[in-house]
């Protein structure tokens, strides 16, 4: 039961959310926060045992003959669930400020879909086998469509169509057959330490399978299936923040890591050199997306492309098939989550307070919104991989893992991309703090005098920014926790 | 013991109730009466199903004449399941229909309409229950003649021409069946299907048997609306009264599929059908072409009933595809889909029936903004649509899973890929309706009258079932697997 | 041509005549006539099938050993009933079509939007 609770808790909040409705907004948001807090505490209670090596599991019923529907905790999923739960609280806090400050419509629907999405994320994080994971993966896609199209405008509808089209298309056309093929070959879909596919098929077949997985997991935004991510940026910012910087995209790379580590097994990938091409595709994506990001003037779009690029770091970490790489990938899921959510929070805060969406309009804004831009700067450093941001550690491990595998070209790609990160992220806080505010807009600003965004939002973004620093100072628990992922598999 | 008489009661109850309807005359009395009758019929097949599952096949000798001379009713794992589907659908759709006909059929014709409906139910149940192949023909004609009349009672005058077209095609089909039966009798001197199988001469010895096989399979294919013999279906489904469309879509083609299974597997046997007649080469191209063409045509329809009718043709393709593999998994896929499609397609047609009841129109334009005006109906439609696409957590997913697994088992990559592609086509045609319903503003000129709960309850019962059987799959999958084994000559 | 196959040839001739009428005629009544001929040909197939050479009518009589097979005849009685019913429904539909469209010619109904 305690393993099912993470999935049920957010769902259990829904009746209360709907009952409270628009009229009792305070009560509604209190329910949301309380559910988040309960969820996080519950996960926190489960976590220590898992990180020490326990693998609690449950099977609820047989979904199909031989394939159970159930959950099994392991370090990677546990960590992911923890991060997502913590950030749900932060996002809810943030959303209170944002949605009210911005007078959004249909807030109850928003919170409801949000809760379903979190439940799906929990289900995916804790799934015991690939099919259970897939079920929640799809549930996540559908529960987030109403969030993406929240505004109901033509643009939102177009964005929603692209979003659904690519995610659904890839999962039905590639991921589903990949799962079926894996089931056909191995006769099981359970996530097993060391993988399940050893000795089941020849190399070409395994290559095909890997390709189906790699492009089927559209949520990992590997090029050429990355376009849904910028398209989804029409959503309200809290949605973009949690779902498209944390939940949805992370479920994508998380699934990818799960497949690489627990379905194929790092050893098998390494021995047959199955995933080299995938590493190169990821390498290409991370450079290309960084380049695109540089030329985006819309702040959220720039962040979206940055996400595409950072996701490929994680895929690359898994694909180089070394234990350091996999560890780094796992850590980067957490590091990037905290960093990117802060950046989105800031983008939303700027929008609510100053009604600005373009990078070129931000000149001098830092003096009016010091907390927001300070948080932005810290988070940006973490994403780039510079102190005092936690991203340093994960990127270091990723680089080490890549070096271990001997792909010098990829190592170079990582370095170049980090430089590009500097080039597209740092100018934003620099402009805000250092550049002179434009004179032309003087009296317009007088008409709309503004300072920081609403207080709950500022608290939320400061909290997540603080987390990135905290992760820089104390990364060891994270590292220890994830070691179980590669060590029990018997990898040196 | 009444248990011994269940097989015959199954047919006799609705058959005798039909003339009673005519005697009762009063619209209200008849409408209550048919609900009771459908309940009894369902109870009957429920008892048969549990009996067959526990104790194996049951037989009934009509008039005490021993088979193979007398007519025998025989219920095994396959047709017990089918009986349950038919009578279950009747029991759900009749209560719905007693409301929906208020707007579609003149009051003074209610008793006749419902009487014919019961005859149709009796005919379909008779096809399922009998073990005598000539008796099959008789029941087929009973159900067909009553369905021509039912379709002809649609509101638009085009219903008449649709019924006429169906009559011509249907009669050609059943006459082919009659020829096939005659040729078989000529060669074997028996009409009992089990006995036929024993006396069947090897194919190379008799061209008569081959001709019989051809006539029988083509005849059934017309009834089943296998591409390219489907031309009668779209018009018939489009212009029939809502409840008739829902019922026929759920049962009539399913019974024909059952008949095809019986003829191919029980009467002729796998060896004849697949090794001598090469069904595994003949059927897949037809099935795939049907799936592809019908799905594509469905995309361009503006009348939603017509759209769903074309989708039915495509779904029939899936079932035939499952059959064409001739393996246990393939047959399981076909039979599971028989069940799932009955549930999902009838729920979709019932939803459209509600729309027609409320607005008097069922074209795409009328669907605009219905997500807000008729939230319960459209939510049911949405879930039904997700079933058609085959999204996880819906019954449609289970069918698709088995179908693709069957294709992979035989290494038919192309077929597997095609199935996946076609579910994307389904996503497109369902997507168009959903988009109109949820993202367009309603036409202010159309006024929606409220839909009675008596119509929404059956709709949601079926919708709930399609979700329930998508999660707890053991009932349909178990029943289908038992039936598949039975057809392949395994355990009863 | 052996006498045994003579009936079969007639059956095939009738069947094709009926089928041809069914396909080529645009008049709904003529189509039904074609359908009727098509069905009748099958009845004949059954009836001639039941004939046993040297057998008499299947009525128990002393001194007779060979009887024709009565079963196909019985079967075809049922089929004839079915055929009549089909024809009746078809004609009823035709009457309704005449009322609704004012014509029973297929091409004219098509012009009125009754057939696609």
Image (tube, coloured by chain):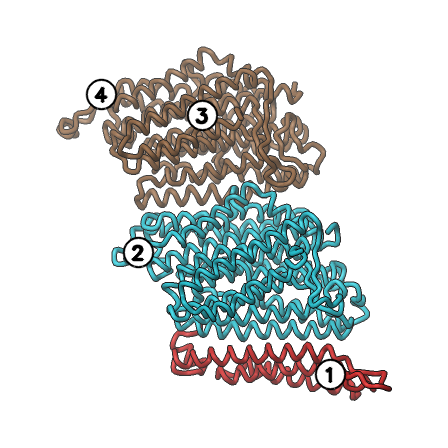
Q: Residue at x 53, y 39 (%)?
A: A215
The label number, if any, that marks residue B448 in the structure image = 2
User: Which shade is chain B?
Assistant: cyan
**Label 2 residue SS:** loop
**Which mark is nearer the camera, 4 or 3?**
3
User: Which shade is chain A?
Assistant: brown
**Which mark is nearer the camera, 1 or 3?**
1
Residue identifier under label 3:
A84
**Label 4 residue SS:** loop
The chain that appears red in the image is C
Q: Is residue B353 above or below residue A222?
A: below
- Are both tags, 4 and 3, on one chain? yes
Earlier in the chain: of badge 4 and badge 3, it is 3
**Which mark is nearer the camera, 3 or 2?**
2
Mark 1 touching mark 3, by CB under 8 A? no
* Residue A248 percent location from the top left of the image: 45, 33
Q: Quadrant of the N terminus of chain B?
A: bottom right
The label number, if any, that marks residue C48 in the structure image = 1
- Are both tags, 1 and 3, on one chain? no
Residue A402 seen in render = no
- Are both tags, 2 and 1, on one chain? no
Q: Is residue A484 above or below residue B199?
A: above
Spatial CA span between label 4 and label 3: 31 Å
């Amino acid at each position: 039961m305690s393993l099912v609770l993470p999935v049920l808790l957010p769902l259990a909040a829904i009746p209360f959310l709907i009952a409270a409705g628009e009229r009792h907004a305070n009560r509604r948001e209190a329910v949301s926060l309380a559910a988040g807090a309960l969820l996080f505490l519950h996960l926190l209670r489960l976590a220590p045992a898992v990180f020490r090596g326990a693998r609690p599991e449950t099977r609820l019923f047989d979904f199909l003959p031989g394939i159970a529907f159930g959950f099994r905790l392991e370090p990677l999923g546990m960590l992911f669930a923890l991060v997502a739960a913590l950030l749900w609280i932060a996002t809810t806090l943030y959303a209170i400020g944002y949605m009210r400050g911005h007078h959004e419509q249909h807030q109850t629907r928003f919170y409801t879909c949000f809760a379903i999405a979190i439940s799906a994320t929990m289900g995916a994080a804790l799934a015991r086998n690939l099919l259970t994971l897939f079920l929640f993966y799809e549930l996540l896609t559908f529960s987030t469509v109403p969030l993406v199209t929240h505004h109901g405008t033509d643009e939102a509808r177009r964005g929603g169509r692209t979003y659904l089209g690519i995610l659904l298309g890839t999962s039905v056309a590639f991921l589903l057959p990949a799962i079926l093929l894996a089931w056909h070959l191995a006769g099981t879909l359970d996530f097993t330490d060391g993988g399940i596919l050893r000795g089941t098929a020849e190399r070409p077949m395994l290559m095909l399978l890997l390709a189906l997985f790699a492009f089927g997991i559209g949520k990992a935004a590997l090029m050429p299936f990355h376009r849904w991510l910028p398209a989804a940026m029409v959503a309200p910012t809290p949605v973009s923040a949690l779902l498209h910087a944390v939940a949805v995209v992370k479920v994508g790379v998380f699934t990818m890591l799960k497949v690489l580590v627990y379905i194929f097994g790092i050893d098998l990938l390494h021995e047959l050199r199955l995933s080299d091409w995938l590493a190169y595709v990821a390498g290409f994506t991370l450079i290309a997306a960084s380049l695109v990001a540089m030329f985006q003037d819309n702040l959220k779009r720039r962040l979206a492309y940055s996400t595409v690029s950072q996701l490929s770091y994680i895929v690359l970490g898994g694909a180089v098939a070394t234990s350091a790489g996999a560890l780094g990938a796992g850590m980067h899921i957490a590091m990037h989550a905290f960093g990117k959510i802060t950046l989105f929070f800031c983008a939303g805060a700027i929008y609510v307070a100053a009604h600005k969406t373009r990078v070129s309009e931000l000149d001098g804004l830092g003096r009016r919104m010091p907390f927001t831009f300070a948080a932005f700067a810290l988070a940006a450093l973490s994403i780039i991989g510079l102190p005092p941001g936690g991203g340093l550690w994960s990127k270091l491990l990723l680089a080490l893992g890549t070096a271990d595998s001997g792909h010098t070209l990829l190592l170079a790609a990582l370095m170049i991309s980090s430089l590009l990160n500097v080039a597209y992220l740092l100018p934003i806080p620099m402009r805000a703090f250092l550049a002179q505010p434009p004179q032309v807009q003087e009296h317009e600003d007088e008409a709309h005098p503004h300072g920081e965004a609403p207080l709950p939002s500022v608290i939320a973004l400061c909290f997540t920014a603080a987390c990135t620093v905290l992760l820089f100072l104390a990364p060891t628990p994270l590292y220890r926790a994830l070691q179980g992922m590669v060590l029990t598999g018997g990898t040196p | 013991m009444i248990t011994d008489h269940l097989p015959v009661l199954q047919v006799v109850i609705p058959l005798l109730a039909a003339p009673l309807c005519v005697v009762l005359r009063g619209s209200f009395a008849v409408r209550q009466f048919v609900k009771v009758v459908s309940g009894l019929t369902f109870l009957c097949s429920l008892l048969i199903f549990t009996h067959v599952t526990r104790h194996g096949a049951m037989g009934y000798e009509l008039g005490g004449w021993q088979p193979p001379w007398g007519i025998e009713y025989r219920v095994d794992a396959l047709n017990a399941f089918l009986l349950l589907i038919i009578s279950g659908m009747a029991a759900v759709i009749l209560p719905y229909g007693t409301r929906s006909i208020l707007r579609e059929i003149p009051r003074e014709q209610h008793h006749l309409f419902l009487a014919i409906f019961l005859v149709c139910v009796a005919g379909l149940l008779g096809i399922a229950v009998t073990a005598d192949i000539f008796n099959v023909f008789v029941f087929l004609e009973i159900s067909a003649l009553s369905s021509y009349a039912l379709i002809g009672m649609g509101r638009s005058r085009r219903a008449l021409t649709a019924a006429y077209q169906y009559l011509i095609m249907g009669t050609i089909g059943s006459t082919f069946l009659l020829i096939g039966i005659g040729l078989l009798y000529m060669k074997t001197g028996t009409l009992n299907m089990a006995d036929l199988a024993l006396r069947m001469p090897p194919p190379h010895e008799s061209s008569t048997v081959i001709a019989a096989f051809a006539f029988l399979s083509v005849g059934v294919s017309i009834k089943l609306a296998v591409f390219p013999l489907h031309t009668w279906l779209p018009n018939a489904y489009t212009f029939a009264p809502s409840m008739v469309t829902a019922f026929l879509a759920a049962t009539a083609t399913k019974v024909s599929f059952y008949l095809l299974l019986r003829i191919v597997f029980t009467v002729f046997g796998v060896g004849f059908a697949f090794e001598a007649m090469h069904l595994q080469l003949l059927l897949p191209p037809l099935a795939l072409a049907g799936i592809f063409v019908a799905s594509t045509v469905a995309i361009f329809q503006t009348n939603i009933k017509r759209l769903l009718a074309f989708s039915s043709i495509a779904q029939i393709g899936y079932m035939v595809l499952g059959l064409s593999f001739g393996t246990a998994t393939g047959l399981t896929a076909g039979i599971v889909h028989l069940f799932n499609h009955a549930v999902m397609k009838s729920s979709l047609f019932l939803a459209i029936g509600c729309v027609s009841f409320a607005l008097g129109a069922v074209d795409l334009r009328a669907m605009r903004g219905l997500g807000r005006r008729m939230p319960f109906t459209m939510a049911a439609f949405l879930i039904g649509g997700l079933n058609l696409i085959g999204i996880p957590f819906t019954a449609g997913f289970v069918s698709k899973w088995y179908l693709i697994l069957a294709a992979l088992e035989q290494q038919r990559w192309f077929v597997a890929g095609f199935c996946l592609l076609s579910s994307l086509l389904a996503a497109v045609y369902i997507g168009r309706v959903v988009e109109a319903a949820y993202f367009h503003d309603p036409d202010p000129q159309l006024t929606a009258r409220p839909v009675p709960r008596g119509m929404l309850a059956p709709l949601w019962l079926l919708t709930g079932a399609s979700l329930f059987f998508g999660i707890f799959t053991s009932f349909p999958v178990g029943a289908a697997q038992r039936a598949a084994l039975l057809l392949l000559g395994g355990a009863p | 041509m052996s006498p045994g196959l003579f009936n079969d040839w007639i059956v095939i001739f009738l069947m094709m005549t009926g089928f041809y009428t069914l396909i080529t005629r645009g008049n709904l009544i003529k189509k039904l006539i074609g359908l009727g001929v098509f069905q009748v040909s099958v009845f004949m197939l059954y009836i001639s099938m039941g004939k046993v050479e040297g057998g008499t009518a299947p009525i128990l009589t002393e001194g007779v050993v060979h009887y024709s097979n009565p079963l196909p005849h019985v079967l075809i009685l049922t089929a004839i009933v079915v055929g009549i019913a089909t024809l009746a429904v078809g004609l009823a539909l035709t009457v309704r079509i005449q009322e609704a469209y004012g014509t029973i010619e297929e091409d004219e109904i098509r012009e009125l939007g009754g057939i696609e």
